[in-house]
Image: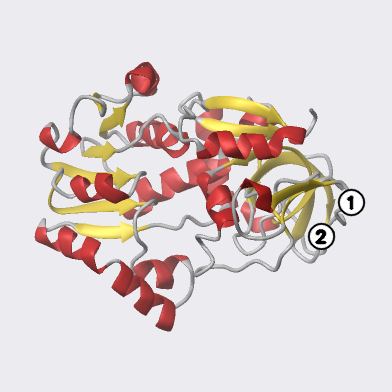
Amino acid sequence: MRALMLTRYGGPEAAELRDDVPAPSAGPKEVLVQVRAAGLNPVDFKTREGKLRVIRRYPLPAVMGNEIAGVVESMGSGVTRFSVGDRVYARLDKDNMGGLAEQAVVHEDHLAKMPASLGFETAAAVPLAALTAIQALRDELRLENGQRVFISAGAGGVGTFAIQIAKHFGAKVATTASPRGEALVRRLGADVVIDYTRERFEEVLHDYDAAFDLLGGDSLARSFSVVKRGGTVVSIAGVPEPETARRDLGRGGALAALFWAASFGTRRTAARHGVRYRYLFMHPSGSDLEAIAALIDAKKIEVVIDQIFPFAKAKEALAYLEGGRAKGKVVISMSN
């Protein structure tokens, strides 16, 4: 089968599109999916660059890709929730990847039926970003009706979902965007939009209940002053902390100690502001994807796609995403 392979860690040249990759087969509780489309995410090029090797080392060469939409082709023993021909989508198991290929294997618990209202390319844009948003806002920030949340970079892949999910929970949303992205984030429901090319958000926003950081670095450091004492800042782009090792990765000991040291400065800044800091690695969840599909079909969530690339241009698509200017998601269509 055709697949985009990670052959070594490095730049764009480290990924190679091959036509002779052995097809996978479904084991117990697994489903073999004929992939019709695959979404791209920053984790894809960060994995290629080797930035995540301290957390997870893949035996190379490995099929890249983390989210898919497609059709159930066959099932392993013990699968009860799906049938051949079902239209499905998933965020793949973190230990395996495998989405940028003509076929992929998914554990039954990570799979869900696609939103009935979406085609494959649009559905493939949903799993990783939407799961990240809902798990951060619902499980970590525990947003409630009437609360105020700051979401940085609202026009990006995760940001477009986060704004809408926060509004679904009844929260007031502030976000940052360029002039080019302002109309988009306002359409999605943002109540306050800070033009980051002209203003510093921490000079405008004060006493927010929570913040969801999607940028890391200086933006994360400045987010702590936006949140009132007793609030929480959750990041997916900052520095992992010990709870990340224990809760998100199922690890402890050495990795928790490493994260403790690496995040010391960030946690100290958070403590100075009286704010809790949490770094989140989202987890695959078929049940969460079912809930998200219901919101999409009820038109509570709009899926924003920046561009769809043919599979033959998968490397170019990854380079485009890496450029950092995409508004919404970048998707690979396997039919082109």
Q: Quadrant of the C terminus?
A: top right
Q: Quadrant for residue 276, please give it.
A: bottom left
Element type at mark 1: loop
* Near-viewer residue (317 or 246): 317
Residue 309: which disc? none
Vertical arrangement, residue 142 with respect to residue 309, above or below? below
Q: Quadrant for residue 60, please give it.
A: bottom right
Give the mark toward the camera: 2 or 1: 1
Name the residue rendered at 34%, 60% in the picture.
Answer: 239
Dot 2 alpha-carbon crowd within 10 angstroms: few under 14, some 14 to 19, many 20 or more? some
The residues bearing labels 2 and 1 have C-alpha atoms spaced at a distance of 19 Å
Image spot of residue 72 (x, y percent): 80, 45
Vertical arrangement, residue 20 with respect to residue 148, above or below? below
Residue 20: which disc? 1
Image spot of residue 115 (x, y percent): 62, 32
Q: Amino acid at mark 1?
A: Asp
Residue 26: which disc? 2
**As drawn, is 64 to the left or to the right of 289?**
right
Q: Amino acid at mark 2?
A: Ala
Dot 1 alpha-carbon crowd within 10 angstroms: few under 14, some 14 to 19, many 20 or more? few
Name the residue rendered at 31%, 73% in the picture.
Answer: 260
Image spot of residue 191 (x, y percent): 25, 24
Marks 2 and 1, the one that precedes in the sequence: 1
